[in-house]
Amino acid sequence: MHRAVLPLVINHLQEETQGCFQTDIRSWKVLEAEGVPTQTNGYDCGMFVCKYMENVIQPNSVKWDLLMNLQAEMPNLELNLHLCCYVPR
């Protein structure tokens, strides 16, 4: 299912980012990640994206083998995110 949706997502990103890149992002090579945790509910997608992006930006910072049950870690990750973003008045 995800592979079928991917071209639609890439086309949408191309439309939304016109003028931001020197090349058409539809020509970029798409790599499939292996050995990463997967979401098992319908509402933690944002946190999963944050962890995936952390891995893309800082490849050695995330130890996926320690997070294979990432879904169970969601409450702690969400708390840490809230604490990082909290700005006292």
Image (spheres, rainbow, N blue to C red):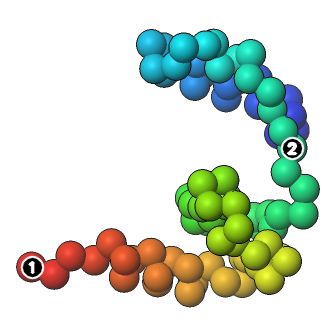
Q: Secondary structure at mark 1?
A: loop
Residue 76 pos. (x, y %): 56, 86
Q: Residue at x 44, y 75 (%)?
A: 81
Q: Which residue is label 1 attached to?
A: 89
Give whichever of discs 2 and 1 has the lower sequence position.
Answer: 2
Q: Which residue is label 2 attached to?
A: 32
Closer to the eye: label 2 or 1: 2
Residue 46 pos. (x, y %): 56, 58
The residue closer to the viewer here, 56 or 72, is 56
Quarter where residue 34 is shown: bottom right
The residue closer to the viewer here, 1 or 62, is 62
Horizontal arrangement in the rendering, residue 69 relative to residue 57 (left or right): right
Quarter where residue 32 is shown: top right
Residue 40 marker: none
Residue 78 pos. (x, y %): 51, 77
Q: Residue at x 65, y 20 (%)?
A: 25
Q: CA distance from mark 2 to mark 1?
A: 43 Å
Q: Residue at x 67, y 28 (%)?
A: 9
Q: Secondary structure at mark 2?
A: loop
Residue 15 can be seen in this image = no
Callout 2: few (<14), some (14-19), or many (20+) C-alpha neighbours within 10 Å?
few
Residue 65 can be seen in this image = yes
- Amino acid at circle 2: Glu
Viewport quadrant of the C terminus: bottom left
- Amino acid at circle 1: Arg
Viewport quadrant of the N terminus: top right
